[in-house]
Amino acid sequence: MALTNSAKRYIRDKIYLGKRKVRKIVLAAPFWVLLIGVTMTSLGIGRYIYLTDNRKDQSMNTYWEYGAQMPYRQMSVYARGARPGGPETPPVYINNTSSLRRSDILAIRTALQNIADSSMGVSSKGGLPEDGRPRGWEDCYSSYLTATITSIADPMSRTEFSFNSASEIIAIDGNFPAFHPFRYMSGGFLPEIAVDNRQIVLNDVLAWKFYKSYDVIGEKVSLWGEEFTIIGVVAEPSDRIARDAGVEQPRAYVYFTAMEELAPLTAPSADTQQNPGGSSSAPAASTASASDAASAIPGASSAQSTRPDMAILCYEAMLPEAVKNVAKNDMSSSLTNYTPADPNFYVVSNTGRFNVIDTWRFMWPIGKTQGRLGAYELPFWEKTADLTSQHLFADEILTVAGFVTLVSGTIMAALRYRKMSRK
Amino acid sequence: MAVFLVVLALLTFFSNTIMNMTIPLVVTGTAMRGNLSYTNSATGQIVSDNQIEVKGLEGRTVSEVLVSNYDMVEEGDVLMTLVPVEDMSELDELENQLLTAQRALEYAQRTPHHAPTYVAENQAIRTAEQALATAQTNLNNATTRDQTIAAAQQILSANQSAVAALQAQVTSASASVEVLNTQLAALYAQLAVIDGTATVVIPTTVPTGMYAARPSATAGKFDPEEPAPADPDTATDPNAGTVDPNVAVDGDPGEGTTTTTTTAPTTPSTTGTLPPPTPTSDRQTVVNQIAQVQGQLADAQNRLSGYASQLAAAQAAVTAAQEVITTAEALPSTYAAQDAVADAQAALSAAQVALSDAQINAGIAADQYEDSIEDKERTVADLEDKIAKTRARLTQTEIVAPAAGRVCNITVIAGDKFQAEQVICVVVPSDSTYSVSFTFDTNVVQSYQVGQELTANYYFISKIVITNIKPDPNNPRDKRIVKCAVYSNGEMWPGETITVTADKGNATYDHVVPASAVSEDNSGNFVFVVDQSSGPLGDRYVVRRVAVSIQATSGSFIAINGEGLDNVMVVTRSEEPLHNGDRVRLEDYSGNSN
């Protein structure tokens, strides 16, 4: 009995103490709510700043517009291509409603040059300058594929052994570094006007994999059966989001014309993969197979052509913007067969894409944009940007929630203060 | 207190960490003199050698573009449709202008326009010429006036005395004639008395005027068939009123006498009394005397006539000399005459200038008239042409392909408004050939020659052959334009740029940096140099943008040229893109960074 009574007393005491604790906690709730609100808001804003600051490749217009009399807007266009032999074959032109090829780039450049001349008040005969390069604005384009790169052994140098690496190949043309701020480990990037069509730039992952060093200027690697000279080693942004997007993988940059000329249109055979370097027969075989495949590939220009037109998967431009947001229309209007209601190209304004409104537009309705982007092969920088947008969306929700919590806590604190004042 | 110190330590730690996180890390190097291997390459645009430009209609709006770049079209295919024009006021305005211009032309053509005759100007010239001639004559006369007057006075003086003498002689001769007439009358009277005939009325006087005094030879002549006149010998008393034919009458010098002595003539006796009748022999004498007196009378009359003529001549000479003197004395002075000549010449020049001006003005007026007509005709023609074009421009609803081929360089989209002379696309015929022009340094081109092939790594290009080399008009000394024919494996796109490599070389440059050091923005190529400043909180590094030009590149290294590149820290690598004026940290190769 006594035991029963003591147990009841114990339980009653515990309940009492618990009630007191709960009461204490409840009385302290405004503080906790405020703390949580501040934390959430700070975290959201801090991450927002951090993430956007890490994506400088989305705001290269702020660097480009130095000395300019009007702001610039960085724009990107993503198109599609067909890979006749899988991911190790280059994307080829499908049709004019969803693909871009070099001739389309020429038309886009001409149209944009006319627009740029008009907006800058430049009197010109129309079209591009004689060197074919944009005047008063800038652009570049690229395609990507997977290929096996082999370091060429040279007993006279540090490369005593040959290594293979399945790497992502970015085939570029134009002023690519103006849009992609690499951290240079050595050397430089491919000049806009090619010094040598057989030059290559490795990323730090690939260079380290081959040579355990970044000081590899002048070394030779084999790609598509041809020797390429390394002229630079670059490191792409490697924050967590970028890593999630697959940045940290072996990668090399070559000229688009080199890809057009050399990339095989059929998946390389196992022999070629195992012995890709130093063999003069390799490119011939590639060319022959490409010729055979050409007729069956959409986008093949004519019977005379031995290779189809390569598809350009990403076109980027830095456009002057005399009136806010007009560059978006300029970019869209320069694309033949582009209709905003039924877009066959993914046109994105890099400038300002991380602001609150554009982030919500990108994410809302949830899954719609991502579903549309599934039709495109996006490069690592766009994947990174999209992932960043998703993170920013979460951060914005966090910030909004934190702000709401902060407001709620403030109201609760005010009410409690009022109650205590009455007592 | 302990809590405060902990917080302070944490803040100190994180502030340094945060600061380091916000300042980008850079690696610097020096732009050094070095040798750079490079490739001579150049970029050019592929140009169709016989493309056809399609121009838009100014002011019209594109409704729909029916083709896209590089579509194949046939001649006449619709390339794009245009928004119909509802407002035709532009055409109406032009037609009104045309009507006005046509009226103006018609009125101008109907306006009389005659060439001037210059009558007044020519008359003025003739008058001026006459005045000049007169003035010149006056000048000549004025110049010789003194001599003229002197000569006239000499004539005058010479003839005045002659006139007096001649007048005396004439008077004397007249008197002689008168006397002889009297004698003759007396003789006739004697003869009549002798013959017993009726009394003859004897004129007592005969005219003694210079010309009228001359007696009629017939009237005074003795006629033998007539009744015999009185014998002059008997009828005349040589001593008493008879005329001695051998003796000249005083004051009448007689035949052959030329003296002009002014001796007062003695008036012959003219008593008028006939001698008394004589016998027959006396009659004969009277007749003889009559004949003798008639002879003398004839002589006297001749002399009188001669003297009269001489007197008239002398008087005429005197009159003429007096007139000359009067005229000469009336002449102006030499200076005045010279002034008059100058004035006359000026007047003549002015008249000629006036004529010339009038002719020029008339010519100008004629030209202006013709020009005015031509202008109006041209205006009408231009307006007609403009109306035709405007009508076509306003009523046309389609732009069609001018030839078969591939459509390229479409520069318009639906909704665009055409500008004047805007090329909206080009059509490249299927059989078109292509060329491309590259600009090389002169020293690079020295080894080039027409027909030589250049290297281009493009899958669609089979061959690039040099067809022409010429100096670059913009820099003829240092640059050469190398024009090449491009042959392709497949198709080429006009406007596409290709890069060719010429040859490789190497050279030494003053400033060679890693290619990563050189960036590009809207203002051109540049590098960042690091400016260092020291302060109480340590060294501070700030980047400064320096514009550079690229001399050559090997891909991994670039030779640059710019101001202030010697012995400065050039940023060769950076964690992130930099702005001008950014603060940076320098890479510490010991593993730490400051």
Image: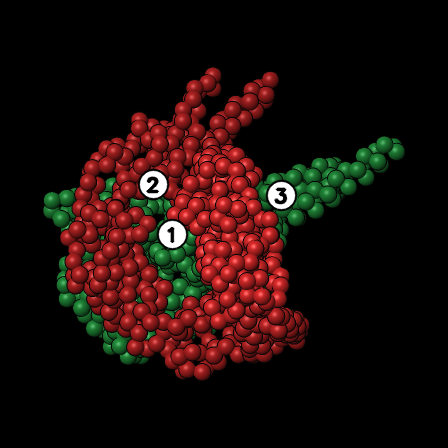
How many residues crowd mark 1 within 10 Å: few (<14), some (14–19), many (20+)? many
Rendered shade, chain A: green
Task: Tell me the distance, in whole angstroms, between the alpha carbons under discs 2 and 3.
Answer: 50 Å
Mark-to-mark CA distance, 2 and 1: 19 Å
Of the two numbered discs 2 and 1 in the rendering, the one whose residue sits closer to the viewer: 2
Query: Looking at the image, can residue A353 be seen?
Result: no
Q: CA distance from mark 3 to mark 1?
A: 38 Å
| Chain label for disc 3 | A
Q: Residue at x 52, y 58 (%)?
A: B278
Tell me the colour chain B is drawn in. red
Are the residues under badges 2 and 1 in a single subunit? no
Badge 3 density bin: few <14, some 14–19, many ≥20, Cα 10 Å = many
Foreground tag (3 vs 1): 1
Task: Work out whether residue B14 or residue B108 is closer to the camera in this orientation and state it.
Answer: B108
SS under mark 1: helix
Q: Which residue is mark 2?
A: B549
Q: Residues within 10 Å of mark 2 (few under 14, many from 20)?
A: some
- Find disc 3 in the rendering and name its residue: A40
Q: Position of residue B506 (x, y in %)?
A: 18, 43
